[in-house]
Amino acid sequence: MRPEELKGHLDGLILAVVAPQPLHGYAVIEQLKARSGGALALPEGTVYPALHRLEADGLLESTWSTASGRRRRVYSITRRGEKELGASRKRWRVFAGTIESVLA
Amino acid sequence: MSYLNDLESELSATGIPTRRRRRILAEFADHLHEDPSAQLGAPRDLARQFADELGTRLARSSAYRAFAALAFCGIGLAVMFVAVGRMRGLTLQGQTQTPTPSWTAPILLVAALAAQVALAAGGLALLRAWRLRRQRVISSRDATVLARRSALGMFSGALTLAALPACALAFPRAAGHTWTTFAWVIAGLGIASLLAATPALIGSLRLRPDVDGHAGDLIDDLGGWVPRGFTPIRVALVLALVIVVVLSAAGVATADPYDGILRGIADALACMTGFIVLGRYLGLRTAS
């Protein structure tokens, strides 16, 4: 899947992979790849600005943790983020259903 | 580690604050440790993306904070006038009844105009920020308009507040001890609230999105609130007319219709002058 096709959906995708458990940036990208069967091959660095923005918007929160002596930022979803994720899923179902009904 | 050095230089060049920069670099260093062959993207593009996304949020939040600070000042002023009930002592009419220094008239005039400019600019900043609330990234022109509206609103609010103690000094007998105390307290609290909103404004000026696009005008801000075919100048004219009608009606209600009409015309003229002088600067007429 091309990166431009993800525009408008990246926030929902990030919230979806962070929702089950807190993840650091690298793990978020790995989860996106794993859960999409490798289809979501976007430039890895572009996820970080989105993570920072989602945190600034109050949809994610983050803390420092240490792994093998290295500091890493771990992100978890907030209550507001969960609400946004629900809304994002709803929007996607309506969108996908509409496109499907036209294309089918 | 030259990739991280390049990224640091680019982040610094786009205006990302030091603390945020360190955090980004730590995250990227961790990522590269996990996967040394990771394709993270060009440092310049990444720095630009950070600046666009974070700058957008800063521009919006600075407008919200500016409006909140101005609203706090406005509420403080309203409470003061209502609680003390000395409004007539502050008017130019009151000035003729009490001997006052010659410098009071320009101060009162500036304060009266500044209060209205603060209200208009702060309200317009809020309107634009609200209109753009769902946009992930806004254009640099939109960010400029937001910053100008916020800055002008805050500056005008500060002018209004600074005039309060001056008025208290100018009208010691008309004002009285209670009014003087209120004036200093409200001015102090108001200035403090404006100062609290200043870092967000400075931050939005330092870290700005760099995205092409039109900023639109007043019609875009008002959206569905104005009939189709309306132009910004027509909106300003309608507003000026409303001001004349409302102030004239207020004059009639207080058994002083001529005073009301004169005030209405003066305020309407001030409104139109403000629109003509500041319209382009504040993104009311055309894209700045």
Image (spheres, rainbow, N blue to C red):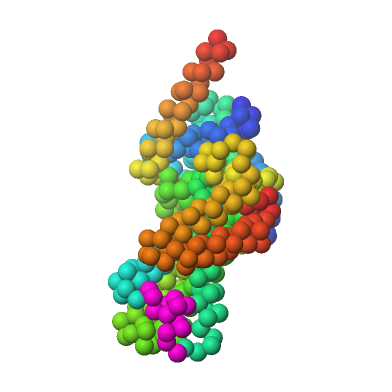
Q: Does B13 appear above or below A94?
A: below
Judge by depth and name the residue closer to the eye, B187 or B26: B187
Quadrant, the N terminus of chain B? bottom right
Where in the figure is residue B268, as x and y percent of width and height? 56, 60
Q: Is residue B265 visible?
A: yes
* x 52%, y 66%: residue: B262
The answer to whether residue A42 is left or right of residue A23 is: right
From this view, report whether residue B13 is shown above or below residue B114: above
Residue B210 visible somewhere in the drawing: no
The answer to whether B50 is drawn above or below residue B75 in the figure is above
On whether residue B91 falls in the magenta region, the answer is: yes
- Magenta stretch: includes residue B69: no
Relative vertical location of residue B144 with respect to residue A103 in this rendering, above or below: below
Q: Name the residue nearer the viewer: B113 or A35.
A: B113
Tell me the residue at 69%/53% (across/down). B288
- Tell me where residue B74 appears, x and y as whole percent: 41, 65
Residue A37 is situated, as x and y percent measured from the top left of the image, at 53, 25
Q: Residue at x 38, y 74 (%)?
A: B87
Residue at 53%, 33% in the rendered image: A9
Q: Which corner quadrant of the image does residue A103 belong to?
A: top right
The secondary structure that most of the magenta stretch takes on is helix
Q: Along the line of sight, which residue is nearer the eye, B4 or B183?
A: B183
Q: How many marks?
A: 0
The range drawn in magenta is: B87-99
Could you tell me residue B165's position as x and y percent? Answer: 43, 82
Frontmost residue, A57 versus B63? B63
